[in-house]
Image (spheres, rainbow, N blue to C red):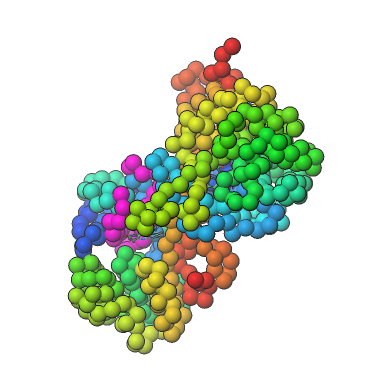
Amino acid sequence: MVNTSVTLSGLTLDNPVIPASGTFGYGYEFAEIYDINCLGSFSFKGTTREPRFGNEPPRIAESASGMLNAVGLQNPGIDRVISEELPKLRRVFHKPVVANISGFSIDEYVECCGRIDREEGVGLIEVNISCPNVHNGGMSFGTSPESAAAVTRAVKAVTKKPVYMKLSPNVTDIAAIARACEDAGADGISLINTLMGMRIDLKRRAPVLRNVTGGLSGPAVFPVALRMVWQVYEAVKIPIIGMGGVSGAEDVIEMMLAGATAVEVGAANLVDPLASKKIVEALPAVCERLHMENLKDIIGGAHHG
Amino acid sequence: MNNEIFEIIANRPVAKNTLEMVLSGDTEGIAPGQFVNLKLDGFYLRRPISVCDFGPGRLTLIYKVVGRGTEYMAGLGPGARLDVLTGLGNGYDTAPSGERPLLIGGGAGVPPLYALAKRLLAEGKRPAAILGFNSEDEIFYRDEFSALGVETAVTTADGSYGIRGFVTDAMDRPYTYFYTCGPGPMLRAVYDKSVTSGQFSFEERMGCGFGACMGCTCKTKTGHKRVCKDGPVLTKEEIVW
Ligand SMILES: Cc1cc2nc3c(=O)[nH]c(=O)nc-3n(C[C@H](O)[C@H](O)[C@H](O)COP(=O)(O)OP(=O)(O)OC[C@H]3O[C@@H](n4cnc5c(N)ncnc54)[C@H](O)[C@@H]3O)c2cc1C
Ligand SMILES: Cc1cc2nc3c(=O)[nH]c(=O)nc-3n(C[C@H](O)[C@H](O)[C@H](O)COP(=O)(O)O)c2cc1C
Ligand code: FES
């Protein structure tokens, strides 16, 4: 019997597989086709203080082995997430959920995290300081160690739940940002968010996305994500949730060997709604084949010395 | 939503750059106005295509070759298998149609109206159709609509067949309700010209096609709606242009 359970800051998950924010809604669409309680947890759609429509369409473009999105944090706002979505979500998912929070000012992060702190079903808070789609915020917090630390400190002051800072890959030194978050009191690091990119429509001779740029995700980014998880693991002692291009059980193991304690699955859920379930189901057999009895033991296992 | 494997039975040209693909597989739960989302080898995102016709174990799609994905589809032969998500979108509501609904389709927007015509006929209604194309070589399914007993007018922009002009040039006639699908500017023109209530089928670039990613959201008078899940069919009263 393979033991797939892992622990994130005191929160024990049956397995390390967590659908990523923005690719799993609030779970309902997936609960229609499988029992999502097989998952370790899931991270719900990025939530802001006010309701947001997001960017104008088109918001989606395709690329080789991946996709670009410029959704721009569409969400119903923290009030409705708490009063409507969370109670509905509890009916289909009975484990602690990951609350993904975004903001355009420190005040907004503080208010949202303070409100979510009182929600029983939330196991940990993932603070997105990296969304590349929003012009006046998001990006800037995640691109300097000082502002990343400032958000971390402010949020830590208003919640007892574990706080995982979700980093942007669009930086020159991701390890420095991770270290700043750790020093400011973060309980863990979550990475990577999407890589900024764009596509041009040849017939229209204009960008495909109305927002011009969007975030790249999917298998195309896996090696970049893996490298960043590796670097952050060498830089901090707190646990890491690794993500970026994960599409199979082998990818989960690779991420864990690089240093991730748990792994999020994003775009893969959109092209195959059963992707996360298939990964959970494949994991024990893959571990057995690789002679891994206890998944916990392989975290960071590829770092020697 | 269901995830099914379909097998191609036929894939043949029906007009310039336009093919009809007939598939066999489980069509349980499919309704007129819904779409399917096709996984194609070598392409990351699925391709959404409207349900043109369906019966037990049989599904018909009509698609126009406009890019690499549809070009790849055109190269598939009988026996090829496709991973398909079915039962996507809300579909048409036939309850408000009245006795004499008008179906208005433009180009690649014609296909979903065929399944709708069959449904309306089965309900004892007497639909009429206006099918709009750029030119004669792009026309498809005129005979299929006529064979159902649906009074069918065809317009071509260049006048090479039927009524010269756009679908709106054939709308001066009595009707109790309308259903329309086609390119954006055509939908807008139909909206402006129409004298009754009706339903519009929209397209948007999609990430998932089943409501999870918020990639396809549009603004309506009744709030933000996901074209893939709360649409693709919207009523005239809720549309914001
Ligand atoms: C609900 C719905 C129903 C549709 N029904 C039909 C139909 O019955 N017949 C038909 O011919 N076409 C239909 N379309 C359009 C069809 O999806 C596109 O023509 C097709 O995806 C183009 O793929 P491509 O790889 O050839 O083009 P590319 O331009 O190379 O595609 C690149 C990306 O853009 C997306 N894309 C391109 N054009 C469109 C479009 N118009 N709408 C949505 N996504 C697009 C593709 O899916 C792909 O992700 C429908 C679209 C939607 C949203
Ligand atoms: C459509 C879409 C929407 C996303 N929305 C959010 C979001 O609201 N908050 C967030 O922190 N990350 C968001 N992300 C980023 C993912 O959670 C994840 O970090 C990224 O996609 C990399 O993983 P992947 O390659 O497996 O998709 C989104 C990604 C996609 C594709
Ligand atoms: S395409 Fe994902 S929500 Fe509509």
- Residue in the picture at 38% in, 53% down: A201
Looking at this view, name the residue that lies furthest to the top: A305
Q: Residue B221's spot in the image, x, y percent?
A: 57, 71
> Which quadrant would the N terminus of chain B be assigned to in this image?
bottom left
A188 vs B178, left or right, is right
Q: Identify which residue is drawn at 24% across, 60% down.
A: B18
Magenta part of the protein: which range? Answer: B41-68
| Front position in the image: A213 or B106 | A213
| Residue B65 lies in the magenta-colored region | yes
Residue occupying image coordinates x 68% and y 34%: A145
The answer to whether one can see residue A192 in this image is no
Q: Is residue A194 left or right of residue B137?
A: right
- Whether residue B33 appears in this view of the structure is yes
Q: Nearer the viewer, residue A74 or B104?
A: A74
Where residue B168 sits: x, y (%)?
Answer: 35, 80
Residue B35 falls in image quadrant: bottom left
Residue B166 picture location, percent across and down: 31, 77
Above or below residue A73? Residue A17 is above
- Count of labels in the image: 0
Q: Quadrant of ligand 1?
A: bottom left
**On the picture, is A206 further left or further right than A14?**
left
Residue sitting nearer the eye, A77 or A168: A168
Outermost residue toward the right in this view? A157
In magenta segment, residue A283: no
Q: In the rendering, at what x and y percent does residue B58 appear?
A: 29, 57
